[in-house]
Amino acid sequence: MRLTLIVSSLFVANSAAFTVPSWPHATAAAATRRASALRMSDGSYDFDVAVIGCGVGGHGAALHARGQSLSTAVFSGGDVGGTCVNRGCVPSKALLAASGRVRDMKNEHHLESMGIKVAGEVEYDRQGIADHAKNLAANIKGNLGNSLLGLGCEVIEGRGVLTGNPHEIKDEATGKVYTAKDIILAPGSVPFVPPGVTVDEKTVYTSDGALELQFVPEWVAIIGSGYIGLEFSDVYTALGSEVTFVEALPMLMPTFDREIAKQAERILIRDRPIDYRTGVFAAEVTPGIPGEKPVTIKMIDAETKEHVETIEVDAAMIATGRVPNTANMGLEDMGIETNRGFVAVNEKMEVLTKAEGGEVIPNVYCIGDANGKMMLAHAASAQGISAVENIAGRSHVVDHDAIPAACFTHPEIAMVGPTEEQCIERAEKEGWTLGKSQGSFRANSKALAEGEGAGIAKVLYNKDTGKVVAVHIIGIHAADLIQECANAVAAGTTVKELSMMVHTHPTLCEVLDEAFKGAVGMSAH
């Protein structure tokens, strides 16, 4: 039996906000399994695999390593769960869930259409909502830690870094050096703060500070209109804030499918207290003092760099993306060149010395945000599993086109595969014909019963083979509906095959059934 070491990166920003009790001691059975596994090492190395980072990607690699009968040690760096669990996906969903209920209860027209009346004004407890997010993150973090211990993993609190010598990892907390046959880098990412922006995490904050919900500003500017910015605009407007987007590119939601982005602008922005500036940089953002001094935002034209406007708001959220958390990991000592912090890898997640013409660094892998292939938690987990497969001698490559993504607004946006614009380019380049078919929530019984008829599902497929290439959805529970589509892309399922599959009635998934049937000339009831 080989040994595996998972080394967690230390994400220090705002860690105090998510203080949790120490994990419960492993059960006697788990301790016995761990001791037995450690004794069975062949002794060539301290461990067989070292994964530096214990976010969702590192945790996924650890679970799969244990599934291969590999003993596992985790250098947690005080941050089991990483960004996703502590400062990202998980607590933000708690804020969205709570604020979404406030929005629903304040929507008198919607409630009255179903015969419901709410007496008096709908109120919420800001601290209670913030605590809901904090407690959820703490619970999930504890669960992840317990799962590692329960599977016999050795949990070490320090952060792991490379020493420059092959097969070596140093625990920064103690200085002790460990050896491992293979190393997986999974340090995750941190919020990107553009030049000229001063962050105090009180009135000018990244997603880290926003998740603490220290106060609900009357007017908040959100710099950036991607996934994170959109989700927080949903939270803030539900809780009573006015929002201004500041977007450097000429259009809002620049990475989204254009048709879906237009739908999102109509559904999520026009009917809400939201305005926006596009084609401008927030060149200077100066913090204020809550209730006393406003935040000042100086905007310049993205092309001419000339000053165009200065606004004063109660708060500013910086949602301009994320950058790899790869600094001070010892990468340079291993001959690894990074590009803006990103580590180059091949399709097997093996680390290359550099992006162009680089050579493989033996026994070193990199997964998750740090390699930049797809900055999503579940993509990191898939890459972690893939890396362990390759380490175990079973060649594996992740199909990133089949990995879904979602934006958890109300209603949600979800997608798998390229945008329609990208599909058009790909079809022309590769010589195939692009097909397109849509289903509408407006014609769906379940959506109408919920009073949520806004949205569409768009299926893009290869007319020559019938295979699904991409699907884009905006509508109620889009994040759940997309999985069927991701499975179809992964399996190479054709629209003809999907059109003959039975979908439960009445359910939201019949929106997809309508699109699949429409692709082959059939009608859906």
Image (cartoon, rainbow, N blue to C red):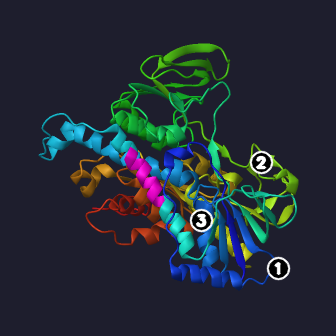
Amino acid type of the residue tagged 2 in the rendering: Asn
Amino acid type of the residue tagged 3 in the rendering: His
Residue that appears at 69% across and 80% down: 38
Residue 362's disc number: none
Please name the residue that numbered disc 1 is placed on: 44
The magenta stretch is 131-140
- Give the mark, 2 or 1, whose residue is nearer the N terminus: 1
Asked if the magenta segment contains residue 328, the reply would be: no
Q: Secondary structure at mark 3?
A: helix
Instruction: Tell me the CA gap for discs 1 and 3.
Output: 24 Å
Residue that appears at 88% across and 62% down: 165
Q: Quadrant of residue 56?
A: bottom right
Residue 244 position (above or below residue 492): above
User: In the rendered view, does 229 fall on the left or right side of 70?
Assistant: left
Q: Secondary structure at mark 2?
A: loop
Q: Position of residue 77 (x, y in %)?
A: 65, 56
User: In the rendered view, does 496 fall on the left or right side of 427?
Assistant: left
Please name the residue that numbered disc 2 is placed on: 328
Mark 1 vs 3: CB contact within 8 A: no
Front residue of 343 and 463: 343
User: In the rendered view, does 473 fall on the left or right side of 121?
Assistant: right
Q: Is residue 398 visible?
A: no
Residue that appears at 68% across and 72% down: 388
Front residue of 495 and 89: 89
Q: Position of residue 49 (x, y in %)?
A: 73, 71
Instruction: Tell me the CA gap for discs 2 and 1.
Output: 28 Å
Instruction: Tell me the CA gap for discs 3 and 2.
Output: 22 Å
